[in-house]
Structure formats: structure tokens, C-alpha cells
């Protein structure tokens, strides 16, 4: 997990060597959430403008928050055609971009061109920008083509059919597997009951085609997962750049865990209320457990895991 912030080239070098880098997608369009996650230990965070509601001003604040921590920052843009989105994300200081819905080698070339400075690509140069605040115009622009991270998303049947040509495009750092959309594109949701499509022979064959093409061209393998149950499986397959979900999924799963634990703890199944920040993620117990004329709620000090930062109502299990 994240420690001292690495240069882009060192980050990629470690991924090539098989050192796992675990990350998270950020969909909440919250600079506060992005900043706190940057200090949580993830190696990278990706602001998802494809499926999130954030505009450029909000994106700027989120990337500024991530920059305060140790995580690398990426932005998922709309697609290979989204020159403006790629330009803004990189000018605002993102360490890289994830470009979705790549179907052909021509689309892959256009995606890479938008992200790279001439003469390798066609990215426009402008000063001052946040991306240049530390190294200056020449210090940033002169090294970006080797330091930046360009990831292409593999999520369609056409992409798999053309994966040998796509993987061979110069400047592609990461091929990022999107199993959900790929299953949809291949018609596997219609053929299999959930979740059998994710272990189907068709998806396994498509994944193997991706793995072989990436290995042949020395391209890093990445993918999106919900949770950690299959991380070991994909590490064994050579995937080193792995997302284990998104911030909203983390919120829902941990909230669900808290609700289930409190319901199990009381036969009356009271509705519990949290007041964030009083004094810290304070749990309030219902009046029925107190004296008849007591105030409606009283604060209860949460338990804390030894050496951890997150308060838990019961036990010391880490979040899902």
C-alpha cells in the first residue's frame, strides 16, 4: 500500500515487476472523501468522471485533495474522443488517465495521442497549470511522456477481438479489464444466471487473450473488482493494478455491516443514529435503553481496533 509518493516511471516499474498496487474508484464527487481516501493507504485513486457527476471545477478540488496524500491520481474520462476531458484531467495534475470503451487499434492510437505531448502525441501545452507547479513548464512537459500513466479499458467483445493490435500500440501503459461491461457486451448476462458469468469459460477465454497480448507487449494488466475475494486469483494471472471497488460501494458495505451488527445485538432492533464528528463518528443509543425521562439519546464511545484509525461499534474487524 501507499507510502512515500513515487514518480510515475517508478510506479510503473514496480507494476511491471509484479508489485501489486491496490486502488479505488471515487464516484461521490466529494473533495473531502477524495482527500481522506488519499491518506487511507491505497496506492492509487481514480476519479470517475465517466460515471460520476463531477465537472471540471469539482474535479480540480478532488485532485487537489488527493495530491495531499500518498496515492497516485487517475481520472476516467468519457472515451478516446474526449480530448477536452483528457486535457483538463492532466492539466489539473492527474498522474494519469483511464480511457474507456476502446474497440479498435485506431481508437487506442487516438487515446494515446490525446494524452501525450508532441511529437509522440497531440496534447496541447499551456502554462501555468497545477500539473507544472512543482517542476515548471519544461520540467513537467519534458518528462510527461515517460512519467504519465495511460490506461485503456478492455470492456467490449470488439476490444477482445482486436486486443493483439491494441496491446501493440506504443504508449499504452495499462490494459484495464472491465468484467461487467465485457460480460454485457459478450451476451453473458443473458446466457448465465448471476454471478456465473464471471467464472464462465467465455469470460475466462477472453481474459486469457488479454493476458497473452499484454505479456507479449510488456503492458501492465489491471482490472476492477468489487471486494477482495478474487484479488489473489488475479494476482496469480499477472494483474498487478487492481481496484477493489469504489467509495460508494465501501460506504454501502460498511454501513450495511454496522446496521446488521446493531440489529443482531438487540432483539428490539432499534433504529440507530450516527452524528458524524461528535466527537468522532459517535453512535447514539435509543432512549428505551435508558431512564424513562432521559434525553432521547446518549453518546457511546466507539471501540477502536488496536493500532487502527477507524472506530467500530463492536469488535475489531476491518471494513469489507
Image (cartoon, rainbow, N blue to C red):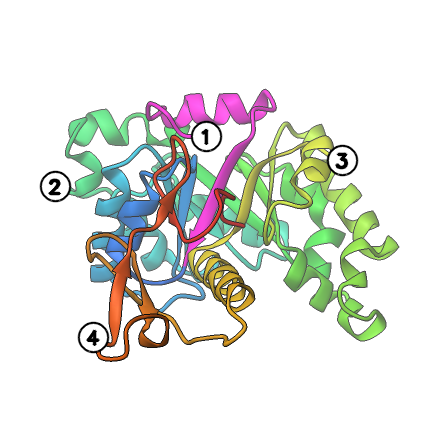
Residue 13 seen anywhere in this rendered image of the structure: yes
* Percent of width and height locating residue 30: 28, 60
Residue at the image position 44 percent from the left and 62 percent from the top: 78
* Percent of width and height locating residue 245: 52, 53
Q: Quadrant of residue 168?
A: top right
The numbered disc on residue 212 is 3
Of the two numbered discs 1 and 4 in the rendering, the one whose residue sits closer to the viewer? 4
Position of residue 136 relative to residue 104, above or below, is above
Sequence-wise, the earlier of marks 3 and 1 is 1
Q: CA distance from mark 2 to mark 1?
A: 32 Å
Characterize the local packing of mark 2: few (<14), some (14-19) or many (20 or more) Cα atoms within 10 angstroms. few
Q: Which residues are magenta?
A: 1-26
* Percent of width and height locating residue 92: 24, 47
Sequence-wise, the earlier of marks 2 and 3 is 2
Secondary element type, mark 1: loop
Position of residue 256 relative to residue 233, above or below, is below
Q: CA distance from mark 3 to mark 1?
A: 27 Å
Residue at the image position 37 percent from the left and 46 percent from the top: 303
* Percent of width and height locating residue 61: 21, 53
Q: CA distance from mark 3 to mark 4?
A: 65 Å
Characterize the local packing of mark 4: few (<14), some (14-19) or many (20 or more) Cα atoms within 10 angstroms. few
The numbered disc on residue 128 is 2
Left or right: 112 in relation to 174: left
Q: CA distance from mark 1 to mark 4?
A: 44 Å
Residue on which disc 1 sits: 1
Of the two numbered discs 2 and 3 in the rendering, the one whose residue sits closer to the viewer? 3
Q: Mark 2 touching mark 1, by CB under 8 A?
A: no
Amino acid at each position: 500500500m501507499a507510502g512515500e509518493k513515487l514518480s510515475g516511471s517508478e510506479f510503473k516499474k514496480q507494476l511491471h515487476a509484479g508489485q501489486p498496487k491496490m486502488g479505488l474508484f471515487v464516484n461521490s464527487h466529494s473533495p473531502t472523501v477524495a482527500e481522506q481516501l488519499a491518506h487511507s493507504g491505497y496506492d492509487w485513486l481514480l476519479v470517475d468522471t465517466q460515471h460520476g457527476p463531477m465537472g471540471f471545477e469539482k474535479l480540480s478540488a478532488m485532485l487537489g485533495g488527493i495530491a495531499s496524500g500518498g496515492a497516485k491520481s487517475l481520472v476516467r474520462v468519457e472515451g478516446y474522443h474526449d480530448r477536452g476531458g483528457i486535457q483538463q484531467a492532466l492539466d489539473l495534475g492527474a498522474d494519469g488517465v483511464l480511457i474507456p470503451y476502446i474497440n479498435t487499434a485506431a481508437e487506442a492510437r487516438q487515446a494515446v495521442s490525446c494524452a501525450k505531448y508532441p511529437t509522440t502525441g497531440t496534447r496541447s501545452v499551456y502554462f501555468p497549470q497545477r500539473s507544472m507547479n512543482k517542476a515548471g513548464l519544461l520540467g513537467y512537459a519534458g518528462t510527461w511522456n515517460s512519467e504519465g500513466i495511460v490506461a485503456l479499458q478492455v470492456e467490449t467483445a470488439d476490444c477482445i477481438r482486436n486486443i493483439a493490435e491494441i496491446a501493440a500500440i506504443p504508449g499504452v501503459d495499462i490494459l484495464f479489464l472491465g468484467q461487467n461491461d465485457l460480460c454485457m457486451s459478450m451476451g453473458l448476462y443473458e446466457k448465465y444466471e448471476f454471478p456465473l458469468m464471471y467464472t464462465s469459460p467465455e469470460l475466462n477465454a477472453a481474459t486469457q487473450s488479454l493476458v497473452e497480448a499484454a505479456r507479449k507487449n510488456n503492458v501492465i494488466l489491471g482490472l476492477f473488482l468489487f471486494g477482495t475475494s478474487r484479488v489473489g486469483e488475479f494476482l496469480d494471472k499477472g494483474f498487478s493494478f487492481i481496484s477493489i471497488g469504489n467509495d460508494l460501494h465501501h460506504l454501502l458495505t460498511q454501513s450495511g455491516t454496522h446496521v446488521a451488527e446493531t440489529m443482531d445485538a438487540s432483539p428490539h432492533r432499534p433504529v440507530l443514529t450516527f452524528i458524524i464528528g461528535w466527537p468522532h463518528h459517535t453512535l447514539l443509543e435509543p432512549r428505551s435503553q435508558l431512564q424513562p425521562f432521559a434525553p432521547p439519546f446518549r453518546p457511546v464511545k466507539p471501540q477502536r481496533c488496536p493500532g487502527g484509525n477507524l472506530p467500530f461499534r463492536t469488535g475489531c474487524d476491518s471494513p469489507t
